[in-house]
Amino acid sequence: MPRTAAGPRVGHTGAVTDRRRRTLRLRTRVTLWFSLTALVTTLALAVVTYALARSFLIDQRLEVARNQAENNARTVRDQLLAEQDIDVARDLRNESGGFTLLFRDGRPFVADLSVSPESFPLELRTSVDQGASAQQRFELDDKPYVAVGISMPAVNAKYFEAFPMDSTQRNLNAITTALIVGAGITTLLAGVLGWWTSRRLLRPLSRVSHAAGEIASGEFDARMPPENDPDLSRLASSFNDMADAVQARIEREARFASDVSHELRSPITALTAAVEVLDGRRADLPDRSQQALDVVVTQVRRFDHMVMDLLELSRIDAGSTELHREEVDLRELLPRIAHRYGFGDVPIDIDSKVPGLVRLDKLRVERTLANLLENAREHGGGPVRLFAEPAPKRHLVLGVDDAGPGVARSERSRIFERFARGSAARHRVGTGLGLALVAEHAQAHGGEAWVEDRPGGGARFKVSLSEAW
């Protein structure tokens, strides 16, 4: 049953799920931490690697271009010195994808007519015009090049050659892709390693959490299995010793409450019988004695109800009461319970979607509804409606509406505790155990009990029962 916004519910049906969610969240955080650390580290290494590779490849390409341009320029110079009538344009050579330009006596010579002096950067041409050799990277038609300019005063010429850097750029792109893929794979492997490591490290803690959750839900025999690791073995041993001590103390206190309740049952029965005899002859008593008798009768009955409730709770705590489901017709059962406990005039509303036959423990349901009706009469201005309605996952919801002031939100979970009483019941007669029994019977049915506001005023107490059909 999902929790409504109206108020908290009582029960342990979601305890296991909550523990699993907390463990999963912790594992997820550890995995994310591993992945994030690996990603940051890998990216840092990738950036450094890319920067070093880029610097090395570009420097290497620039050096090769400079050496090749110097060799080509030397060849051209030698030819110009040896032959005055050389066809300069014909003998210009350049790397595939590159281009060459030669200035001699102020005249340009090119091997490719598509090349002009403006194809080379102005800064490079200016440096060479001043008699220096220079090198510069540039782009032409969105393609990267490195240009080398060499001044040759011996032949009154200037040599320019452009080398393509496409291969260098392709190599850098391949390195970038490899680094990105490597970072992704490393991050994924780190995530897998983090998940495996967190699972291995948290497995003992999960066993501790699981055992503690079972003990918290009432399974006091739950213990941790032995561990091979010495440190974890001490943890398991300490936890089991603590669980043994807690179980022994709880069982001792439960036996004490049960024994006290049993011992009180006989004198309470005798006292009740004697009080009933006196109450039957109250007309023979003076007025002041009748008033005293009324106080005695009220307190004896309250004491008797408290002892009966304590006996029932002690049997539940001892596990001596089992859930006996049987098929019953709510349209017959609810009116019968209402009449049996003196609430025959309370309207009963059974939703049409509730099946004709439902599976539940008839005795527990009777005790639950009787306590809710009594609670409404004693503390809620009287019951105004008894109802049954279906809920998701084959749950059945039973409830009682009252005409009282309602229950404060701060008290909605506490009133289902033993001997706890809301502010509206502090000056009224009651044992403080009725709603605790309601919560116990609801939990036995795999459900829970809670209270919310009733539209129009008052409180609406609800109990969910699982697997009702």
Image (tube, grey):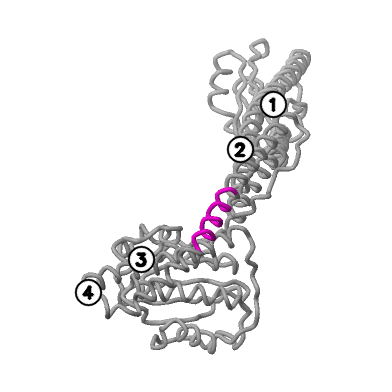
Q: Is tag 2's residue or tag 3's residue first in the polypeptide sequence?
A: 2
Residue type (three-letter) at the residue carrying disc 3: Gln
Mark 2 → mark 3, Cα distance in angstroms: 64 Å
Q: Which residue is mark 3?
A: 299
Q: Quadrant of residue 185?
A: top right
Does 11 appear above or below 167? below
In front: 7, or 319? 319
Q: Is tag 4's residue or tag 3's residue first in the polypeptide sequence?
A: 4
- Which numbered mark, 4 or 3, is in the foreground of this view? 4
**Percent from the top left, x then y, of residue 58?**
67, 25
Left or right of residue 237, residue 14 in this image = left
What span is colored magenta in the figure? 252-265
Q: Main secondary structure of the magenta part?
A: helix
Categorize mark 1 by other alpha carbons within 10 Å: few (<14), some (14-19), many (20+). Answer: some
Cβ atoms under marks 3 and 1 closer than 8 Å: no
Q: Which residue is mark 4?
A: 286
Residue type (three-letter) at the residue carrying disc 4: Pro
- Which numbered mark, 3 or 1, is in the foreground of this view? 3
Mark 4 → mark 3, Cα distance in angstroms: 20 Å
Kindly state the secondary structure of the residue where label 1 is placed.
Answer: helix
Q: Is tag 2's residue or tag 1's residue first in the polypeptide sequence?
A: 2
Mark 3 → mark 1, Cα distance in angstroms: 93 Å
Q: Which residue is mark 2?
A: 33
Cβ atoms under marks 4 and 1 closer than 8 Å: no
**In this rendering, does residue 142 appear at all?**
no
Q: Which residue is mark 1?
A: 53
Categorize mark 2 by other alpha carbons within 10 Å: few (<14), some (14-19), many (20+). Answer: some
